[in-house]
Amino acid sequence: MVIDPFYISKYEVTQSDFVDVMGEWVFNFGGNPTHPAEKVSWFYAVEYCNRRSIQEGLTPTYSYLGRSDPDQWYVDYPGWNEDRNNHTNVSCNWEADGYR
C-alpha cells in the first residue's frame, strides 16, 4: 500500500488553537493556552478538522451522512456526536486537501 504525501504538524493542537476554531471549551487541565487540547472526543476531532479546513479555504475531509458542514450536522442530526455508534455515519474523502 502506498500512502500519498501529506503534511503533519510537529506540534500538538494547543488549547488556544482548538478554542480559536471551536469556540469556548472546558479542558480538564485548562488555564494555559499553550497546553495541548484534551478532553476531545473523536467526533469533536472530526468536527475540528472540518471547521479548520473551512476557515482556511480547504476542502473538508469528513462528512456526516453526506454533509461536510459541521453547523449542518447539528441542525439536521441533533445528537450526532453523542452516540458512539454514529461513527459509522462519518466518511472520509481521502482526496480532499482538508485536515484529518
Image (cartoon, grey):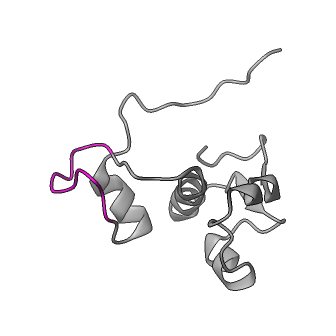
Left or right: residue 29 compared with residue 7: left
How far from the left and from the top, in percent, is residue 50?
60, 58
Quick one: 90 or 79, which is closer to the camera?
Answer: 79
Image quadrant for the N terminus? top right
Q: Magenta span covers which residues?
A: 26-36
Q: Main secondary structure of the magenta part?
A: loop
Quick one: 21 or 78, which is closer to the camera?
Answer: 78
Q: Quadrant of residue 64?
A: bottom right
Residue occupying image coordinates x 56% and y 53%:
49
Residue occupying image coordinates x 37% and y 37%:
12
Tell me if residue 11 comes above or below residue 44 in the rendering. Answer: above
Tell me if residue 71 comes above or below residue 48 in the rendering. Answer: below
Magenta stretch containing residue 28, yes or no?
Answer: yes
Left or right: residue 21 compared with residue 97: left
Quick one: 75 or 87, which is closer to the camera?
Answer: 87
Quick one: 47 or 84, which is closer to the camera?
Answer: 84
Q: Residue furthest left?
A: 31
Q: Quadrant of residue 54?
A: bottom right
Tell me if residue 95 comes above or below residue 85 in the rendering. Answer: above
Q: Residue furthest bottom?
A: 75
Residue occupying image coordinates x 33% and y 71%:
24
Image quadrant for the C terminus? top right
How far from the left and from the top, in percent, is residue 73?
69, 74
